[in-house]
Amino acid sequence: MSVGDFEGEIVKQKLSRNPIAFVIVLIAFAWNLALLVGVVFNLSYAHSRAAGGKYTDFPVGIRFVYFLQFILVAYQVLIFKLIFHTEMVKPMWLPKIFFLIGILGTLVNGASRSANERLNVIPAAIITWSFWYYGMKKSPKS
């Protein structure tokens, strides 16, 4: 490996762990968590942005499901921080599962009747991309 190749690898590594990308993904997670909290606590800002935008008062069942989603997304934040900082994640297939969940979430939000809920595609796509790029594409082959 020549010095030029080595320097090129260092540049690629610096770009792949871009702090701006990290912050953008964390903002997407924050949006999702704030929205989930809004549903769990039945806050007015969440009414048009969740569950199809059809509720002015979320039923207890939906609030419970969104509480479970809050726990999942909080766990995703922890896993994302690990994979971004190239720490080992066990089980190793977890980023792939989160990527697949992200695809499903992006599709569900995009298919909503509520225009406000369709906007949730943006943070969902950012998070989905992050699990693909940092968790699957950049993961070491075992």
Image: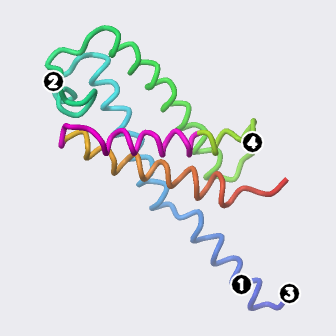
Marks 1 and 4, the one that precedes in the sequence: 1
In the displayed structure, does residue 121 sit left or right of residue 82? Answer: left
Disc 4 versus disc 2: distance between alpha carbons? 39 Å
Instruction: Judge the density around disc 4: few (<14), some (14-19), many (≥20) Cα neighbours within 10 Å.
Output: some
Pointer 2: what residue? 44
Residue 2 position within the rendered picture, expressed as x and y whole percent measured from the top left? 82, 91
Disc 1 versus disc 2: distance between alpha carbons? 52 Å
Pointer 4: what residue? 92
- Residues at discs 1 and 2 in contact (Cβ within 8 Å): no
Residue at 33% from the left image edge and 40% from the top image edge: 109
Disc 4 versus disc 3: distance between alpha carbons? 30 Å
Pointer 3: what residue? 1
Q: Amino acid at mark 2?
A: Ser
Q: Which residues are magenta?
A: 98-115
Q: Mainly helix, strand or loop, the magenta region?
A: helix
Q: Residue furthest top?
A: 60
Label 3, secondary structure: give it. loop
Q: Say which of marks 4 and 3 sits in front.
A: 4
Residue at 33% from the left image edge and 16% from the top image edge: 62
- Residues at discs 1 and 4 in contact (Cβ within 8 Å): no
Q: Amino acid at mark 4?
A: Met
Picture colour scheme = rainbow
- Splitting the image into 4 quarters, where does residue 76 fall? top right
Residue 108 sits inside the magenta stretch: yes
Marks 4 and 3, the one that precedes in the sequence: 3
- Residues at discs 3 and 2 in contact (Cβ within 8 Å): no
Marks 1 and 3, the one that precedes in the sequence: 3
Judge by depth and name the residue closer to the eye, 107 or 28.
107
Residue 103 sits inside the magenta stretch: yes
Residue 17 position within the rendered picture, expressed as x and y whole percent measured from the top left? 59, 63
Pointer 1: what residue? 7
